[in-house]
Amino acid sequence: MLDFTLNDEQRMLRDLAHDFAVKEILPVVEHYDKSGEYPWPIINKAQEIGLMNLNIPEAYGGPGVGVLEECLVAEELAWGCSGIQTATMLNQLACLPIIIGGSEEQKKQYLGGWVMDNRKMPAYCVTEPGAGSDVAGIKTVAERRGDKYVLNGTKTWITNGPVADLFVVLAKVDPNGGHRGLNFFVVERGWGVKTSKPIEKMGQHASWTSEVIMEDVEVPAANRIGPEGAGFKVAMEVFNNSRPPVAAGAVGVARRAMEEAIKYAKERKAFGQPIAAFQGVNFMIADMAMNIHAGRMLTWQSAWLADQHLPNAKEAAMAKAFCADMAMKTTTDAVQVFGGYGYSAEYPVEKLMRDAKIYQIYEGTSQIQRTIIVRELFK
Ligand SMILES: Cc1cc2nc3c(=O)[nH]c(=O)nc-3n(C[C@H](O)[C@H](O)[C@H](O)COP(=O)(O)OP(=O)(O)OC[C@H]3O[C@@H](n4cnc5c(N)ncnc54)[C@H](O)[C@@H]3O)c2cc1C
């Protein structure tokens, strides 16, 4: 049966996230964008009211909501500030390999103990200076020595790297094994992990990313996730669950840009009338609305498939690519609606345009999403 209505619990969660965005995020957006400080007060409040670690199962102290519910929260938080949304929701990405492939012990100790009870931050560490899209091309090695692995390698662009206590790291257990020679490891910072300063970037200034450096870091064999060689499969399953909320974040940014464009188009006058009266302007806004709606529907369906444990690789890739490209186009058009003021840092839309760009890059670029769609179509 097709049903596009949200139930009471879903509406309450969405409203909680929207209220949080209005009351806690909007007043400080400019401060965090301009200062580049890490938004600790917002993160702490989000944890207190249950807007973080949404995917951690109830058995380990989390709310254990579905991917669709994660999407509802992601859209609202990104509507407020997508840098803060990325910093807030990254915990969920980092916890996914443990949720998907972890042992009972790992789940109790790290999801329950570290993340839920002690509010420790995990970071998801796959990308390296020499390999991003080509996951199997990573160089970080995990060499087995008795009941330990010794990890050597450098990760880059790791969201929350500078503030993380825990690193969920993809490494090669078999240097000649290609994509069958990989595993995730749960690595505690105290075991010798080093992180760089935050990398300066175009947008999402409230979200910090850094290098994560491991030199002879000893990790108990019990911290390997899944059987030897399970890493690539776990990484792909992670993407099927993580891409819908990322797509929803892009929808949130686009929706905010459209709302700002509507407000401005009604106020700004040219040739004696509001610019909203010109078809050249209002058709841009009609296109924004159509594309935002289409993106949200793609996102919800891909999330719903994940929640039903049905295959969703193609749909998640479609949602991620469509929404990322759509957010870029919508925010660029919003700047256009604002004219010269759109280009000014005093108005909100230039930040939205800078923030939107990353959705076409992280969690797999828009090109990689298309290679996944093609692979699924030609199977
Ligand atoms: C702000 C930010 C936060 C991030 N957070 C994290 C994180 O928390 N954890 C993490 O592990 N990573 C993270 N990343 C890394 C991100 O996932 C990678 O940047 C992304 O996957 C692309 O990899 P790359 O940068 O190495 O680009 P490359 O893989 O070198 O790609 C360069 C260009 O080539 C294209 N290309 C590559 N291969 C193909 C192909 N087969 N077909 C067509 N085109 C192709 C790409 O689309 C792109 O346009 C983050 C990145 C940024 C910028």
Image (cartoon, rainbow, N blue to C red):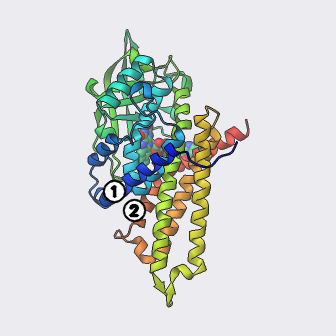
The one of 205 and 31 positioned closer to us in this rendering:
31
Q: Quadrant of residue 48?
A: top left
Q: Secondary structure at mark 2?
A: helix
Residue 23's tag is 1
Mark 2 surroundings within 10 Å by alpha-carbon count, few (fewer than 14), some (14 through 19), many (20 or more): many
- Residue 186 falls in image quadrant: top left
Q: Residue at x 30, y 56 (%)?
A: 32
Position of residue 275 in the picture relative to residue 301 (left or right): left
Q: Residue at x 46, y 22 (%)?
A: 102
Residue at left 48%, top 70%?
261
What's the distance in space between the residues labelled 2 and 1, CA to CA? 19 Å
**Residue 58, position in %: x, y?**
44, 28
Question: Which residue of the protein is positioned furthest toward the front in this rendering?
Answer: 8
Residue 131 in the image: x percent, y percent? Answer: 47, 37
The one nearer the camera, 227 or 283, is 283
Q: Which residue is mark 2?
A: 351
Residue 327 visible in image: yes
Query: Residue 320 placed where, x, y %?
Result: 56, 47
Q: Amino acid at mark 2?
A: Lys
Which image quarter is the C terminus in?
A: top right
Q: Position of residue 81 (x, y in %)?
A: 39, 55
Residue at horizontal 58%, vertical 46%?
Answer: 300
